[in-house]
Amino acid sequence: MYLLSIFAIKKMKRIFFAATACCAILLCQSQNEKDGLVQWLSFKEAQEKNKTIPKPFLVDIYTDWCGWCKVMMKTTYSNPNIAGYINTYFYPIKFNAETKDTIEFDGQKYVSTNPAHPKAAHQLAVKFLGNNLAYPSTVFISSDLKTTFLSQGYLKEQDIEPFLVFMVENVFRTSPFNVFQQLFKDAFYNQSLKKRVSVLSLQEAEKQKGKKKTVVFFYTNFCNSCKVTTQAVIHDSLVADVLNKYYNTVVLNAEEDTIVFHHQKYTKQLINGYPFNTAVLFITANKFSLPCFAILDENMQAIETIGLFQTPESLYHILKYFGENIYQKMRWDEYVQSQQSKQATEVPENKDKAGKNTPVKAKQKK
């Protein structure tokens, strides 16, 4: 059953970014102040590398006369944690919006709109920015080059963090950016965020067997969207009510050395090259991915595993679908249609109102 995004439109832990900081310093010793610590590529180099190892693109669009472009290079892109993450998980491109060079991108060639004028915009800059030629601008492009997200203006370290995770962990496939951005801030920087769900250990949930279903949310030290789910999404008022009513809620570290489940001890092994505890395969019926969560019945047997990041609204409907046993009498697509016909009148108001409008534009190639 594929439940992922029918309802969806579509303080970063310092220890996580610090894991790439040393890499940034070692790889970028020759980088000068003008370029920061990011190892910038040309469009040609990035596209060639992407053929072998697909990664999202980060395009810094600047001009020689743009003061805030220089500030961003000296601050955000000179932060070893940020630069290390970008160098590891992106193909970063530094693009002068007024260059006179011919650039080939995604099978098309682009040139200056007026080679005789020193400040004429490049055709590719116009493609990315439209009529709003503002600098600095940052474009994030999916590895298949089909989806782009634009942010215009100076991005501080904390501003760029959710963008990076949004692209690297494929959150853009199931969530609008403004929703994820607010949840990200709540998860990593909002110390006063109200915790509305009582989280149990796996052993505590097993002791409750026979009373409620159980939902297991998985996380790791490197999965930031998992942390957004476990630190913010499940405590959203929209989600918390249905969790508390129908489920025992477990938050489980997939990297635990030892996990006991159904009286059996599980240890860590390499799973697709990562050292995960093998219990995650048993709990998810071999459907483990990151991020994901597993829904278990009252006897702690797997019902379904759902992957990818879920917004509070999407998660609410999924939990309701299984919690109220609707899944036993109605297919998921039928449930969706029934909810859409009611125009979501049964969905309680989200008191948290996650997300405000942000200056981000998304484009998707058809």
Image: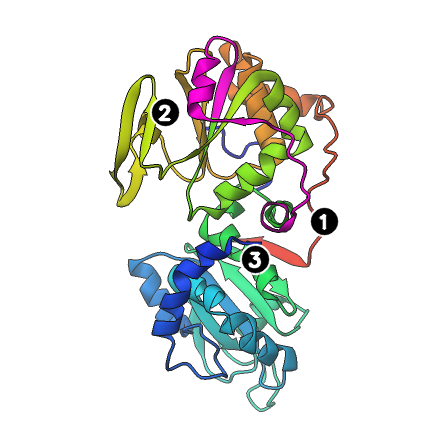
Frontmost of labels 3 and 1 is 1
**What residue is shown with label 2?**
283
Q: Using residue 249 as the reference point, say whether residue 258 is left or right of it.
A: left
Frontmost of labels 2 and 3 is 2
Which residue occupies the foreground of this view, 114 or 350?
350
Work out whether residue 214 can be spotted. yes
Which residue occupies the foreground of this view, 96 or 32?
32
Question: Crowding at label 2, few (<14), some or many (≥20) Cα neighbours within 10 Å?
Answer: many
**SS label for mark 3:** strand
**SS label for mark 1:** loop
Magenta segment boundaries in residue numbering: 186-215
**What residue is shown with label 3?**
149
Which residue occupies the foreground of this view, 334 or 253?
253
**What residue is shown with label 1?**
356
Q: Is residue 208 magenta?
A: yes
Residue 311 falls in image quadrant: top right
Q: Using residue 349 as the reference point, say whether residue 51 is left or right of it.
A: left
Identify residue type, mark 2.
Ile
Where is residue 289 drawn, in percent x and y?
Answer: 38, 37
| 102 in relation to 217, above or below | below
Q: Which sits earlier in the primary sequence, circle 2 or circle 1? A: 2
**Which residue is painted at 55% across and 58% down in the image?**
161
